[in-house]
Amino acid sequence: MAERSGARNGPGHYPPPWGPTEVGLGIVAALSLVILSVFALAGLALLAGLPDDSLLLRYLVFATSEGCLLLVATGALLFSGAGMEALGVTPPASRLGSLGEGLAAGALLVFLTRGWTLALARWAPLLHERLLAEEQRQLQFLEGPWPLLVVAALFVAPVTEELFFRGFVFGGLRSRLDFPLASALSALIFALVHLMPVSSPPLFLVGLATATLYERHRSLAPALTAHVTYNGIALLATFLGWWS
């Protein structure tokens, strides 16, 4: 299969057969499925007498939401007849170098995120308080036994989000748009759907960095490595109290 060239066929991996229109429809479909699944789970929990903050309900909501992203991404393959390489599921050309770059990118993103937190603490204390509240809500939502949290933060979320936001969203945008616009739009979508307004700038950087890694190495492996590294370091630092 020929590589992409120019605005329509840029130097990414195998171009997916879908474009921005299909990406927009996929995002609407994913959000609709998430909302419907959350309401359905809430109704079932009410019938079963589960409290709103039960561990089972919270992790069911998380797993179902991530599953909706995976369903849309893989559904795009089924409808288009493309293979997994269209989502970037392929080994990078230089495995050791690209994975090392992913590790370095993830660590740098943690550093930049910490810088954003410290800047708000110094110059915008009210926003800093809102940032801490956002982070606390996120941690409380997935609060539970360590094995569950590790699987959720270091395996499930990175895999499904990279397949959807980089493989499906960025890949589809990139098949028709130049890299700066495609990466910026996909990173903006990635930041917005997390529903953490004060944390949006660091999340936008995560989206940009992972899209850049995908573009450079024609594989999701380095982007996934960066995502796992970012989540892992941030989680470890939080629970060890390094940032308190």
Image (cartoon, rainbow, N blue to C red):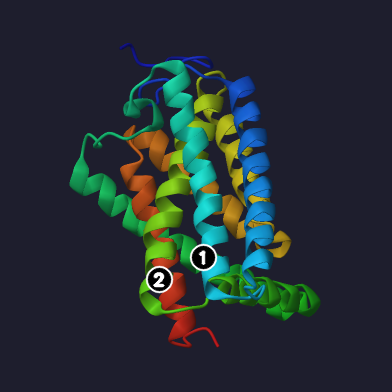
Q: Residue at x 67, y 72 (%)?
A: 52
Residue type marked 2: Leu
Is residue 87 left or right of 202 when viewed as pictured? left
Q: CA distance from mark 1 to mark 2?
A: 9 Å
Tell me the amino acid under the disc marked 1.
Tyr
Q: Is residue 10 visible?
A: no
Q: Nearer the viewer, residue 61 or 173?
A: 61
Residue at figure coordinates x 37%, y 35% from the top left: 216
Q: Determine which residue is flagged by label 2.
A: 148
Q: Is residue 3 above or below residue 67?
A: above
Question: Residue visible at 35% across and 74% down?
Answer: 147
Where residue 61 appears, as percent x and y from the top left, is 57, 59
Residue 187: quadrant of the picture: top right
- Going by the image, does 195 lie left or right of 74? right
Image location (x, y in percent) of residue 135: 62, 73
Residue at the far right: name it: 126
**Structural crowding at the residue carrying mark 2, measured as other residues with C-alpha within 10 Å and reported as few (<14), some (14–19) or many (≥20):** few
Residue located 70% across and 76% down the image: 133
Q: Is residue 14 above or below residue 183?
A: above
Q: Are marks 1 and 2 in contact (CB under 8 Å)?
A: yes
- Residue 79 seen in the current view: yes
Query: Which residue position holds label 1?
Result: 59
Up-down relation of residue 5 to residue 61 (above or below) = above
Residue 235: numbered disc: none
Instruction: Look at the numbered disc 2 and give the secondary structure of its residue.
Output: helix
